[in-house]
Amino acid sequence: MAEITENSLPPLNKATLWGIIRQEISDEVVNALIAYYLGYRCNGDRQGWDLSSVEPSWAQEYPEPPNFIENRPPTVKLTRSIPAENKQLLKEQLGFTGYRIGEFTPRHTRRATAVNWLLSYMVIHGIPLT
């Protein structure tokens, strides 16, 4: 994964979140967004990751940011980390009702999970949805 900085990522807003759902934003950028807001930062020498801002359970299991779109286990962990009161934010804040039968794949599910996690992060940290 390339160096992740806030300036290299799209803003957390409705357009970005819908872009993730509609697959207009690359998997690499989706993974970078999640990794950044989980606390992963590149070391200055770019040889590894600074995990000082990553929750210990994530840092121990994933010393490097995982690929959330390609792999189920980190997405399951992401889902479990969303507080119960934030589980429906995708529907409540974006009005997303799900994918249609026939267009629904694990990749779609993982992208929806990524958006719901980002929405939960925004609520927890007081970031307004614009």
Image: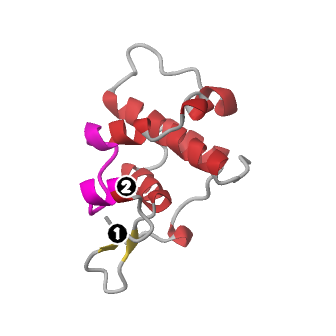
Quick check: can you spot residue 62? no
Given contact means CB atoms under 8 Å apart, are the residues at marks 2 and 1 in contact? yes
Considering depth in this image, is 27 or 120 the residue closer to the camera?
A: 120
Tell me the colour scheme of the image.
secondary structure
Quadrant of the image containing the N terminus:
bottom left
Residue segment shown in magenta: 57-74
Quick check: can you spot residue 35? yes
Residue drawn 70% across the image and 52% down it = 126
- Name which residue type carries label 2: Glu
Q: Quadrant of residue 64?
A: bottom left
Judged from the image, the secondary structure of the residue bearing numbered disc 1 is: loop
**Percent x, y of residue 115:** 52, 40
In the figure, is residue 61 to the left or right of 54? left
Give the labeled residue for mark 2: 28
In the figure, is residue 42 to the left or right of 6? left
Residue drawn 71% across the image and 46% down it = 129
Considering depth in this image, is 4 or 27 the residue closer to the camera?
A: 4
Looking at the image, the residue that sits furthest to the top is: 101
Judged from the image, the secondary structure of the residue bearing numbered disc 2 is: helix
**Percent x, y of residue 103:** 40, 21
Looking at the image, the residue that sits furthest to the bottom is: 45
Q: Reply above or below: 100 against 3.
A: above
In the figure, is residue 125 to the left or right of 21? right
Question: Marks 2 and 1, how far apart in space?
Answer: 9 Å
Q: In which quarter of the image is residue 87?
A: top right
**Dot 2: few (<14), some (14–19), or many (≥20) neighbours within 10 Å?**
few
Q: Judge whether residue 117 is colored magenta.
A: no
